[in-house]
Image: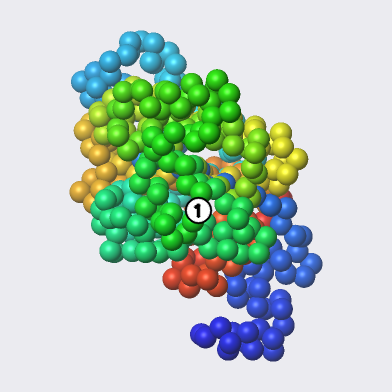
Amino acid sequence: MPPTRLMRRAASLGCLLFLAAAGLGHAQAAGAPALKTRNVFLIVSDGLRWQEVFTGADPQLMNEKNGGIWANEADLRRRYWRDDPAERRKVLFPFLWGTVAVHGQILGNQLKGSVARVTNGLAFSYPGYNEMSTGHPDPRINSNEFGPNPNVSVFEWLNGEPGTRGQVAIYGTWAIFKDIFNVARSRLPVYAGWDAPYPAPADPRQQLLNRLYATTTRFDGEDVFDSFMQVPLLDSFARRQPRVMFVGYGETDNWAHQGRYDLVLESAHGFDHFLEELWNRVQKLPQYKDQTTFIITTDHGRGSGLSEWKEHGVEEKGSENIWIAVIGPDTAPLGERSNTAEVHQAQIAATLAAFLGKDYRRGVPAAAPPITEVIGPHR
């Protein structure tokens, strides 16, 4: 329907029906409480399986034969193994299960009838990041080396919208985020890969981190270590407080590809710690405290079994299955969801915008609708 006709229809039916048609009536209709969210962060751990998120360490992989473990197996089991899956996942992800699941929601436990999946049909990184950030898959994007993204992401769109213009930032370990968010066109501030984090270091601490970026032996030439990126990310709030952020961590995928299940567990546990650090940092700032929503997810799943866990893609069954967690002032604390309607990665973009009272589909009609179940007042 052309915009002019939609506007005339909205005028004739009233503002309430217009907002409902836009998918935002639940948040902004007359009589409904206004959303409290002022800031939204989309945070991604690359290739982190739903199996570990919901059941913790896999006992079949906690050995050298199947998991490629170099660490002391007894020590690894002491740290990450518990007989009860609920306890096992909590020891691996203490913040996710001790805070996010208590005060927010987690979707994607297929053992409990909650399905979250990608719809791009490829189940690897660039198509996944495109789908979640633009709201729709693009069959043209069939390689991680595709180049600059022709699609406008929700981050680029919000960066031009009233109230969020110039209030968007992108942090990621992977250099390809510069293409995914098309920095040449979008002009988004993207801090990614091994680029020196401080172009003009102001003190010895910043000089040291720049030196570490420049001199550390690189396991992956495109992907900086999660711990390295975390430092400038946390530092950034001292000089700038964007309303919208993307944060991408990469090690959970990297170590799985190397067949090192011990380091998958370590990096998953580290991701949880970094997530907690980021949450605590923003909750200490008045412009973020009790006004910030985190959407936490992954770009794709992986295979299962004794060897397929190392890889992902259409040939690895189950790679389309993901998980999505949300915590913030406008998300009811329903915890781990069960027997829910299927949700898709493509819905993340419109969900992010909806938390800010914005209708992303107005700008990108091809985008999937928001996940309305996670947007609403506490019950």
| Residue 232 image position (x, y, % from top left) | 53, 32
Examine the rendering and report whether any part of residue 268 can be seen. Answer: no
Please tell me which residue is depicted at 49% across the width and 36% down the height of the picture.
199
| Residue 159 image position (x, y, % from top left) | 57, 59
Of residues 242 and 95, which is closer to you in this image?
A: 242
| Residue 30 image position (x, y, % from top left) | 77, 70
Left or right of 120 in this view: 276: right
Of residues 198 and 128, which is closer to you in this image?
A: 198
Please tell me which residue is depicted at 43% across the width and 23% down the height of the picture.
211
> On screen, 211 above or below 361?
above
Please tell me which residue is depicted at 26% across the width and 51% down the height of the picture.
145
> On screen, 179 above or below 362?
above
| Residue 130 image position (x, y, % from top left) | 39, 56
> On screen, 148 above or below 308?
below
Q: How is the image coloured?
A: rainbow
Of residues 80 and 214, which is closer to you in this image?
A: 214
Examine the rendering and report whether any part of residue 368 can be seen. Answer: yes
The image quadrant that residue 354 belongs to is: bottom right
Amino acid, disc 1: Leu
Disc 1 crowd rating (10 Å Cα; few below 14, some 14-19, many 20+) is some
Of residues 37 and 109, which is closer to you in this image?
A: 37
Q: How many numbered dots are placed on residues in this image?
A: 1
Left or right of 14 in this view: 349: left
Q: Residue furthest right?
A: 31
Query: What residue did someone put label 1 on?
Result: 188
Q: Secondary structure at mark 1?
A: loop
Left or right of 246 in this view: 70: left
Please tell me which residue is depicted at 29% across the width and 28% down the height of the picture.
219
